């Protein structure tokens, strides 16, 4: 069971943030192309850093708590998952704040345009985005 | 290069990406800091387990030795940079999605659309 510790921690992160998507309707996984666009560069950049740190033995992994699957560079597969899970949790959290505080500014308020984020008019996220736009247009 | 130096460089690079390159200015928004505070709490728990058990061990010669809930302070720099880079790109991509709408508005009333967007919450 100890071998599942790291994997279990990552799973806990996903399970812990799942209600944000399911019940708070943050629509982060629903906008999966935008999510991948934000996460993949982080995976490459910080994954490279991880490889360097691992290769120089700045940090080492205790195989007692790992599945045992190693990627090129002897990086545990859990590390790859870490760079997918943690940035996704970051986006979920940011969008959860937006749902709870729709009048704050987030940097992408006009986010009601066409494309990946146009959203489904039937779901409940449009009001938050629209109200954000509203605020911007006030003097 | 020590983990400490790399951590400081990563934080500075992430700030430059947010403030100068992407101009998303997330670090000047309370929304970002609210989200970061929540994530920091979660990070301290997860990172605490990873470094407390420990699943990950650090070469003591390459870190300052300052720790918070077992995690070396360098991990917090790493985490902050990762969160800021992720959210900057996320917001940037959201702006791109909105570009078509904005261009339409500008075409109708040149100059007006930009003027109608006061800089809030900075």
Image (cartoon, helix red, strand yellow):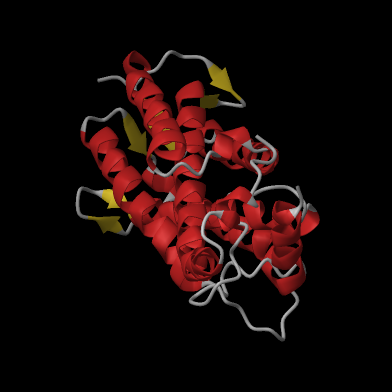
Which quarter of the rendering shows the N terminus of chain B? Answer: top left
Q: Is residue A2 visible?
A: no
- Position in image of residue B88 (x %, y %): 48, 47
Q: Is residue A50 above or below residue A7?
A: above
Q: Residue at x 53, y 36 (%)?
A: B53
Instruction: Return the residue nearer the eye: B48 or A98.
Output: A98
- Residue at position x 66%, y 44% in the image: B118
Q: Position of residue B100 (x, y in %)?
A: 47, 70
Q: Is residue B25 visible?
A: yes
Query: Residue A134, image x and y in percent?
Result: 75, 60
Q: Residue at x 49, y 56 (%)?
A: B90
Q: How many marks?
A: 0
In this rendering, position of residue A16 left or right of residue B81: right
- Residue B44 in which image quadrant: top right
Question: Horizontal and vertical percent for residue A92?
Answer: 62, 58
Q: Using the image, determine if residue A34 lies above or below residue B67.
A: below
């Amino acid at each position: 069971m100890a071998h599942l510790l790291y994997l279990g921690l990552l799973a806990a992160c996903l399970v812990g943030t799942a209600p944000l998507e399911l019940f708070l309707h943050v629509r982060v996984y629903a906008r999966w192309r935008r999510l991948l666009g934000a996460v993949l560069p982080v995976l490459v950049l910080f994954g490279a850093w991880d490889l360097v740190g691992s290769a120089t033995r700045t940090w080492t992994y205790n195989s007692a708590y790992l599945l045992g699957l190693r990627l090129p560079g002897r990086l545990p597969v859990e590390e790859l998952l870490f760079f997918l899970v943690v940035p996704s949790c970051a986006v979920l959290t940011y969008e959860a704040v937006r749902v709870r505080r729709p009048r704050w500014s987030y940097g992408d308020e006009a986010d009601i345009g066409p494309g990946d984020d146009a959203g489904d008019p039937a779901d409940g996220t449009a009001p938050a985005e629209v109200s954000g736009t509203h605020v911007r247009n006030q003097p | 290069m020590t983990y400490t130096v790399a951590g400081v460089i990563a934080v500075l690079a992430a700030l430059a990406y947010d403030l100068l390159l992407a101009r998303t200015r997330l670090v000047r928004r309370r929304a970002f800091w609210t989200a970061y505070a929540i994530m920091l709490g979660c990070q301290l728990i997860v990172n605490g387990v990873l470094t407390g058990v420990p699943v990950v061990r650090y070469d003591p010669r390459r870190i300052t030795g300052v720790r918070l809930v077992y995690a070396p302070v360098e991990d917090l720099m790493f985490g902050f940079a990762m969160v800021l880079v992720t959210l900057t790109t996320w917001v940037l991509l959201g702006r791109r999605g909105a570009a078509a709408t904005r261009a339409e508005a500008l075409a109708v009333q040149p100059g007006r659309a930009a003027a109608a967007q006061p800089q809030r919450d900075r």
